[in-house]
Amino acid sequence: MNQPIFSPYRICPLGAHVDHQGGVALGRTLSLGTSLSCLPSADGRIRINSRQLGEAEFQIGGEIDLTHWARYAQAAARVLEGRIQRGMLAEVDGPLVGAGLSSSASVGLAYLKALAGLNDLDLSAEELVELDHQLETGQLGLQNGLLDPLTIVHGRQDALLFMDTNTGSVTPVPDPPGAGASWIIANSGTSRELTRSSFNQRVAECRQAAALLQPGASALSAVPREVFEDRKRGLPPELRLRAEHYFGEVERVRQGAQAWAEADLASFGQLMNQSCGSSIRNYGSSSPVLVELHELASSTPGIHGSRFSGGGYGGCVVALAERERADGAALSIAERFSSRHPELRPSAFVAGMGDGLR
């Protein structure tokens, strides 16, 4: 096998549910992710061995089985069809599959980078982001924005990323010296599957709100805030709540970037709690188990704030912690939540940060 490709998982502490509307978001990459080693196959077929999920084999250009775990590899081959001839023999490994840390974009980008490398394609960062977006939206039926691939491709170990998902621009916000921050991942033990949740319905509702607020607008980023404030009372109640979340979250992202640059962790944590509250009340994206985990995490000593990681229908909560108290906080969260839900096998750990796709 060749030198492994590493495609990290990501967290989004602020900027939930706005990337599909062209909003701004904050994200960063973890030291956890997808590892993929590969060799070219002699017959042009793609064979994958996953430590977690088993074996799969298919032909480039073949039909995508939307029920099979190998669909991300099949979709990667499909979006590169016509540009690749060599298949691959691959071994793929990655923990926390389906936990809300964007493992889907992580594995999709790993397959794209592997197939490109074996076929002598030199893909730019911009091309990788766009191809992964095509993979998920065009081939697998999700209505994602650019948050996940932008974060994973451009991730930096020492910075948050401020991302404009409308323009695709990425600006690092370096970790302030001596800030004393750590990130905790609390996994509820419940799985999530966006194609079977209300994810796509929420995206459609946001687009409906945009069109009603401003004829011709296909996303809420095309609607000025003052137009929303002037016309929001004319929206159906559910659509008004979706738009309320979008505009509030965009403002929280901008405030959060400033708070991070100023090492104001308390304010950043408060913004995370507000963001999670808006996801629950306005966006309608939550589950009772995750709400309970968020409330438990945010009330733990040493935690500044927390919010759902991912769509909010299962998976993880990400929490901002005081560095010197982070290990104890993670242990407390895991023990307390496990005592309430022993059937779920939850966990919590202090996450290491890492660089982007490499």
Image: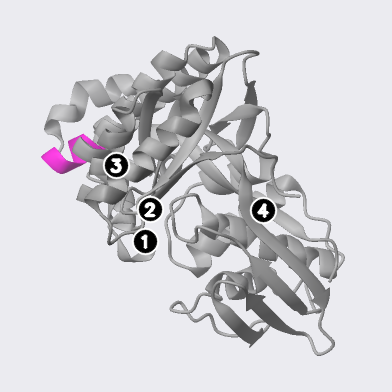
Residue behind mark 3: 336
Residue 168 within the magenta-colored segment of the rendering: no
Q: Which image quadrant is residue 250 in?
A: top left
Q: Disc 4 versus disc 3: distance between alpha carbons?
A: 32 Å
Q: How many marks?
A: 4
Q: Which type of secondary structure does the marked residue at label 4 adopt?
A: strand
Q: Amino acid at mark 3?
A: Arg
For residue 191, the mark is 1
User: Which amino acid type corresponds to the residue marked 4 in the rendered image?
Assistant: Ser
Q: Quadrant of the N terminus?
A: bottom right
Q: Are marks 1 and 2 in contact (CB under 8 Å)?
A: yes
Say which residue label 4 marks: 7
Q: Nearer the viewer, mark 1 or mark 3?
A: 3
- Confirm or deny contact between disc 4 and disc 3 (CB under 8 A): no
Q: Which residues are magenta?
A: 236-243
**SS at badge 2:** loop
Question: In this image, 197 relative to 53: left or right?
Answer: left
Q: Earlier in the sequence, mark 1 or mark 2?
A: 1
Amino acid residing under circle 2:
Gly
N-term mark: 4 or 3: 4
